Image (tube, grey):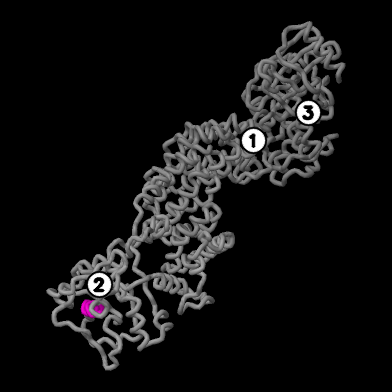
Amino acid sequence: MDFLKSAVASAISKGPSFPYSFGDRVDVGGSIWTLFNGTKREDGSNCSIFSFDVVANKSRLPLARNAVKKLRTLRHPGVVKVLDTVETDTYIYVATERLTPLGWNVRRKSLSTEVIKWGLCGVAKTLKFINDEASSVHGNVRVSSIFTGESGEWKLGGFELLSSMKDDEAVIYNYAGLVPESNRYAPPEVGKSGWDTIKRHPITAVDAYSFGTLIYEVFNGAFTNSEQIALAKNIPPSMQQSYKRLTNTNPKARLSISHFLEQGSRNGSFFDTPLIHATQGIESLGMKDEQEREEFLSELDELSDDFPEEFFKLKVLPELLKSLEFGGGGPKVFSVVMKIAMKLSDDEYDARITPVIVRLFASPDRAMRVCLLDNLPLMIERLPQKVVNDQIFPQMVTGFLDVAPMVREQTVKAILTIIVKLSDRTINGELLKYLAKTSNDDQPGIRTNTTICLGKIAKNLGSSTRQKVLAAAFTRSLKDPFVHARNAALMALAATSDVFTDEDCANRILPAVCPSLIDREKLVRDQANKTLEIYLQRIRKYGLTLPETAIPPSGGSEASVLSVPRMGTPQSDTSWAGWAISSFTNKLAAASGDIQPTPNSASSRVKDNRSTALPSASDVTRATSSAKPASTLHRQPIASPQPTSTHNSQEDHTTNKDDFAAWGDMEEDSFFDASTEIHPASSSTTTNIGSAKANFDDGGEPDFAGWLSAQAQAKPKTHLPKGLVRPSTASSIRPGAGIRSTAAGSISNAASAKQTIVNPKSNPKTARKTVDTKPKDQGWTDDDGWGDGWE
């Protein structure tokens, strides 16, 4: 082998320029030529090189020269394509398209019946052209003369004996016997009388018989003698009758190849196959109307995988791509293109499919856009990231704003496929802006799919925007009127629970999920319970990591005072209200001195309700000593002043500012904010001193001012705490009012459950003033945190 290559290279160096490089030798068998794989030096493309050694085969030189001449002059799709030829005194080289001998596949029996029919049909068309249009005889039809090109099509070669019957000195008459194994393949009449006898018979007789031997050989393997012809073994039944007429021993009774094609092309006959129809229809695809194109594509889509891939890659695919871009092929053509493109290598895909996809995304055709989005999963892995991010996505985003809902919805769904090819900047910038628009779409299905999309791409979002965008989007979807949108929001929250911080879970997510527990739809309620449990488990787990208290320890007398159990409050009391009682008794025990009425008018007592809301400690003691034990007094429910809601506008402003700008006004509604209106004091805002209101209430209004006046007269020398002054008794006692008492007469009406200050000049039933129960400023600051958590 190496010696042969060096000899060929030496011959080329001494002869004319031949711009092709020789590769491995290919076994042909039964030919005067030596076949090599080769490459074109200019571009490295593949080719085949037929080499003829003039010195070693000088007697067959007329056959080689006749083959070169016919190959260069005969142009037909079924004939081997010649690229270049070189002839010298020592060699003849013929460069052709890359070929593979058909004998390889025949010996391995790797050809399916449908592929054999398809190949025979192509060879029959070529021989029909040679016999009818060129008025010539091939004379050398056999397996060794048939090759398969890169497209898988069968190509006819072996033109050593190709002769025109108009030429009296044709090569076939004088040199046919020099062809290797010519006697084995020669028709019966030639075996008896020689090649000159073909002049007296129809032009088609020789090639018809040789074509019959080719049929037998491709279906059965080796052809050794003419006796095998009559067996018709392994030949399809539908073809056997025509096959027998081809191989008739009487040359005048033989079926011509053109008639054989006609019989095979009839409806339901042996050449009526999808693969043959695809070959015939692909060449005229651009000239078909819409109905014909649909029928053709349906047949093409039904082809099984055992058909030659090379044919679809090199013949069908280019025609489909041309029809797709310029012939209005439409989505049906694109679906077939994707099926074929799956079998391409990455390099072939980048060179032939990717540019077409990029151009199609720029097309304004909505049907094509939907088809592209549907097939995106099939091609996303083959598309480079730079192409997707820089060329396809900018065209794709127009679908978010399209007037057709189907286009918008398919665009949202396609994000799940394309997200892996987008850069972080594109995802957290442009993509989120468009998803913010579709989350407000008028179509409920698009809103639902946007929520699902956000939940599934959460891991692809940037850490700085993930929590804000998802919390705003999902909590808003929880209020969507469409049931599946609410359910999708709950499912998305459950799937992205690890995205949010523990504080957000407790302060934002859980309050937003809770209303879904009483949703009108059971589907939503069930999912809300599942989602709530996920977040509760997380909060409980986080709560175990927190310290028991955040109050720093304090020393001195205050610590000793706080450590002493208060009256009426057992130290072991762990009930939910224990803290409220302890807080009240702490403040009551710490107070010293008597609270005396101020000299101001009744209107001033409204402003300083803390100083007038309670009687003095001594009075309380005297009142309770005759009625109830002290422990009973302090076990009464004490309602602390109702805190006024302080909506933190500065904090709201900060939250809005932090939210991602693309989502607009998507933050949660402040439905947890308390009302800032101060309501009139209710029974729960006053101190209930005493045990039974019904025993001391005679239906009238309590004379709290009179009680204060009596106490002031009883103890004129009592010193008031700093900052308190005695009120004017003349302005604070209502005329005609006195201290009302029961038969027991041991406690004044100051112990009644309600304490109201009434304007003497107004209607007692309507002109009630609101008591400001807000405690006086005792040095508390905003650091106490009241109201900070109500966002």
Disc 2 marks a residue whose amino acid type is Pro
Of labels 1 and 3, earlier in sequence is: 3
| Dot placed on the residue nearer the N-terminal end, 2 or 1 | 1
Kindly check if marks 2 and 1 are in contact, taking CB atoms under 8 A apart as contact. no
Residue mark closest to the camera, 3 vs 2: 2
| Residue type at tag 3 | Ser
Q: Is residue 206 visible?
A: no
Q: Is 181 left or right of 447, judged from the image as shown?
A: right
Q: Residue 398, how many percent across, how many down? A: 42, 39
Q: Amino acid at mark 1?
A: Leu
Question: Where, quadrant-wise, is the N terminus in this rendering?
Answer: top right
Q: Position of residue 737 (x, y in %)?
A: 17, 82
State which region is magenta. 704-711
Secondary element at tag 3:
helix
Dot 3 surroundings within 10 Å: few (below 14), some, or many (20 or more)?
Answer: many
Residue 597: which disc?
2
> Taking 498 as reference, is 105 above or below it?
above
Residue 614 location (% of width, % of height):
31, 74
Please provide percent x and percent y for residue 418: 53, 42
